Image (cartoon, rainbow, N blue to C red):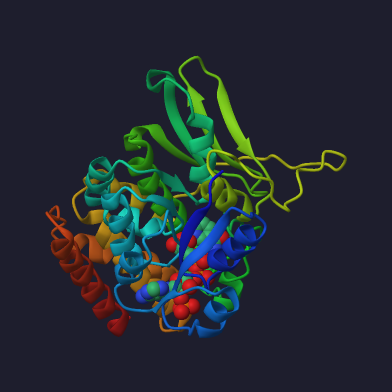
Amino acid sequence: MRERRIALLGVTGSIGRQALEVIDATPELTVCALASGSQPLDKLAAERGVEHVQVGGDLTDVLEASQPDVVLNAVVGFAGVRTTLWALEHGVALALANKESLVAAGELAVSAWKRGGGLLLPVDSEHSGVFQCLEGRARETIEAVVLTASGGPFRNHSRDDLESVSVAEALDHPTWSMGPKITIDSATLANKGLELIEAHFLFDLGYDRLDVVVHPSSIVHALVRFRDGAMLAHLGQPDMRIPISFALTYPERRATPVSTLDFSEALELAFEPADPERFPLLALAREAGERGGTYPCAFNAANEVAVAAFLEERIRFVDIAALVADALDRVDGAPAADLSELVGADEEARRLAAGRVATT
Ligand SMILES: NC(=O)c1ccc[n+]([C@@H]2O[C@H](COP(=O)([O-])OP(=O)(O)OC[C@H]3O[C@@H](n4cnc5c(N)ncnc54)[C@H](OP(=O)(O)O)[C@@H]3O)[C@@H](O)[C@H]2O)c1
């Protein structure tokens, strides 16, 4: 493998820190640019001799300046949209952790990807698993993709129990250690909804061919069903260093420090359906995806506002879904012709959701 210069966006986060570990363990990978939202990066940049650094603002500036071989987009939320579009448009390999950008800007992103012609490698563990199960398969043989969900900390809570769960309980994820926003999304199952939409754009599959199943031990990350009735599954430890390394070293699949599954101990591989009554955000996301246009963008925007309000203890856990449903009812959802129209749709959904937070 030749040297790869990586722009690491969101370096101060959970994915960003794990990406640094992967990069340090792989001699051909070097960091050419670092970015965060607000945390200073001077010390980290000086330690690593990284010349191009940006904190906040439009992160395409640091990409223009550094001209990376690979962009690892590990920013959280809609803030990652511009850099996703930049990498796809310029045909620069994109290792994508920031699922929100593909959800919000799916149509624009796919058009930019087609024009740019570069690699788009998912970092989300489920999509990395699907990507690996699909590699080399004839399209007509693929029937459906099934994403697994851990079910989160409230898998066995009743609807009544959910009325009073605390922020600390929602942040206590049973299998994955992640940043706060995605941890709350995992507890509401909004994360799996975002992932359905992400899979639709990544793999060009209709929503009728995308499914979700709850799998509490998070060992099977994805399943692909073929027309002959066979299924392929992707298994591994729930450790993000595996999909990060896969994306950054593709197609060489370099070694990682992560241990493999240990079959000398019992392994739990249980599956159960997701419950739409207790976790309505999954169905809301699917509906937003099926309606298309800027409905997925509105779903994402309202969800970001609602999750932030829940983390600040301004609304209850169950209010998150109510806020998102309300915003989706009130936006027009018309397709966005360009980024400025998309930003307008994002802002409108945020305004509606923030209004509901204020009156909840
Ligand atoms: N964590 C996981 O295991 C995991 C798994 C799959 C997918 N993902 C996805 O990966 C992304 C990152 O998740 P995470 O868990 O690593 O989040 P995180 O720990 O909250 O980190 C978020 C990163 O984004 C940066 N950021 C926030 N707002 C920004 C802005 N306006 N401009 C530029 N940078 C900004 C933060 O910088 P500051 O520190 O300066 O705020 C931080 O570096 C999310 O889209 C998530 O859904 C994460």
Residue 107 at what x, y percent from top left?
23, 48
Image spot of residue 166 (x, y percent): 56, 77
Q: Quadrant of the C terminus?
A: bottom left
In depth, the one of 315 and 341 nearer the eye is: 341
Task: Inspect this view and state whether residue 109 appears.
Answer: yes
Left or right of 53? Residue 332 is left
Identify the residue shown where x is 11% and y is 54%. Answer: 337
Q: Is residue 69 above or below residue 262?
A: below
Q: Give the residue displayed 28% in from the left and 83% down from the top.
A: 359
Count of numbered marks:
0
Residue 190 figure quarter: bottom left
Taking the spot 50% from the left edge, 51% from the top edge, the residue there is 123
Is residue 15 toward the left or the right of residue 105 in the image?
right
**What is the x, y in percent for residue 279?**
46, 56
Q: Which quarter of the rendering shows the N terminus?
A: top right
* As drawn, 340 above or below 240: below
Q: Is residue 224 left or right of residue 235?
A: left
Q: State the residue lying farthest toward the top.
A: 228
Q: Is residue 186 something that shows in the picture?
A: no
Of the pair 229 and 85, the residue shown nearer to us:
85
- Camera-side residue of 197 and 311: 197
**Residue 223, quarter of picture:** top right
What residue sits 36% from the left and 79% below the top?
Answer: 56
Q: Is residue 221 above or below residue 187?
A: above
In the image, residue 33 lies at what x, y percent?
45, 68
Horizontal side, residue 164 vs residue 139: left or right: right
